[in-house]
C-alpha cells in the first residue's frame, strides 16, 4: 500500500571542527612577574647610578694625584674605594634578586610561547632556567631563548605554523644582551687593571669601570623595554588567536 511519506533525507556533512585556540589552562598571566622584574631592575639601576657617580669622583681624585702641585686627599680616595666595595656587595645581592625574578618571568613567557602553539623551539621552557646556570653556554642560550620568545609572539603567524622559528629577530633584544655582556667585561677588566698597582693603571681601571657602568645602566633600561614589549606581544598574539574566524566570503 503506497504512502505519501517523503523519502528519508540523507544525513548532511558533519559541521567543521571549531578553530583551535590557545590552551587557557596553560596560559600564565605575566603581570606580577613583570612587576617583580621592574622593581628589581629599578633597584639595580639606582645602585648602578650611585656606583657611576662614585667612580667619576674616584677618577677625579686619581687625576689630582698625578697633577703637579696638587695636594692629594688620600683619605677621600680611601673613602671612595670603601664605598665602591660596599656597592659591589650590594650589586651582587641585587643581581641575584634580579636574576631570580627575570628567570621566573622568562620561564612563564616560555610556557606561554608553547600555549600559543609555537612548537619545537630550539630550547624548551626548562632552558629558561638551566641556560643561565651553565658556564660559557650562559653567554648564548638566554639570548637565543629571548629571540624565540620574540618570534613566537608574532600575532601575524597562525597558530601551529612552523614559520615562527624563522621570523625576524629583535634588534632590541640584541642590543640589550650586547650591552649587558660588554658592561660586565669592562667592569671586570677595570678591576683587574686597578690591581696592577701603578697610578696610571689605577686611572685606566677606573675609566674602564665607568664605561662598564654606563653600559650596564643602558642594559638595565633596555631590559625593562624587552620584558614589557615581549609581554605585550604575547597578549596581542593571544587575542588574535582567540578572535573568531572571519565569515566565509569576507
Image: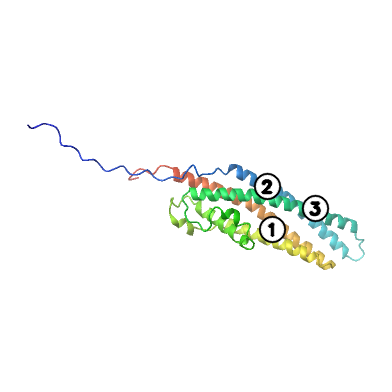
Q: CA distance from mark 3 to mark 2?
A: 18 Å
At horizontal 80% and vertical 64% (from top left) the residue drawn is 194
- Residue located beneath label 1 in the image: 215
Chosen colour scheme: rainbow
Q: CA distance from mark 2 to mark 1?
A: 18 Å
In the rendered image, which quarter is residue 181 located in?
bottom right
Q: Earlier in the sequence, mark 2 or mark 1?
A: 2
**Residue 120 appears at what percent x and percent y?**
48, 56
- The dot on residue 86 is 3
Which residue occupies the foreground of this view, 10 or 238? Answer: 10
Task: From the image, state whether disc 1 or disc 3 is nearer to you.
Answer: 3
At horizontal 77% and vertical 53% (from top left) the residue drawn is 89
Considering the image in quadrants, where does the C terminus appear?
top left
Q: Is residue 212 visible?
A: yes
Q: Earlier in the sequence, mark 1 or mark 3?
A: 3
- Find numbered disc 1 in the image and state the secondary structure of the residue it sits on: helix
In the rendered image, which quarter is residue 35 located in?
top right
- Residue located beneath label 2 in the image: 40
Amino acid at each position: 500500500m503506497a504512502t505519501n511519506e517523503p523519502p528519508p533525507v540523507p544525513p548532511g556533512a558533519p559541521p567543521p571542527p571549531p578553530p583551535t585556540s590557545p590552551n587557557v589552562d596553560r596560559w600564565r598571566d605575566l603581570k606580577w612577574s613583570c612587576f617583580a622584574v621592574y622593581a628589581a631592575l629599578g633597584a639595580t639601576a639606582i645602585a648602578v647610578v650611585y656606583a657611576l657617580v662614585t667612580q667619576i669622583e674616584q677618577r677625579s681624585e686619581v687625576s689630582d694625584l698625578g697633577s703637579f702641585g696638587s695636594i692629594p686627599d688620600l683619605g677621600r680616595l680611601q673613602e671612595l674605594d670603601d664605598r665602591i666595595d660596599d656597592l659591589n656587595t650590594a650589586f651582587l645581592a641585587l643581581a641575584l634578586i634580579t636574576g631570580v625574578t627575570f628567570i621566573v618571568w622568562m620561564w612563564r613567557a616560555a610556557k606561554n610561547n608553547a600555549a600559543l602553539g609555537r612548537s619545537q623551539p630550539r630550547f624548551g621552557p626548562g632552558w629558561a632556567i638551566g641556560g643561565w646556570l651553565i658556564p660559557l653556554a650562559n653567554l648564548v642560550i638566554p639570548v637565543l631563548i629571548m629571540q624565540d620568545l620574540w618570534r613566537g609572539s608574532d600575532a601575524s603567524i597562525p597558530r601551529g605554523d612552523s614559520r615562527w622559528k624563522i621570523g625576524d629577530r629583535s634588534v632590541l633584544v640584541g642590543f640589550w644582551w650586547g650591552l649587558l655582556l660588554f658592561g660586565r667585561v669592562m667592569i671586570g677588566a677595570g678591576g683587574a687593571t686597578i690591581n696592577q698597582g701603578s697610578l696610571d693603571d689605577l686611572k685606566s681601571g677606573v675609566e674602564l669601570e665607568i664605561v662598564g657602568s654606563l653600559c650596564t645602566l643602558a642594559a638595565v633600561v633596555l631590559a625593562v623595554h624587552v620584558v614589557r614589549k615581549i609581554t605585550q606581544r604575547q597578549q596581542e598574539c593571544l587575542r588574535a588567536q582567540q578572535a573568531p574566524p572571519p565569515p566565509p566570503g569576507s
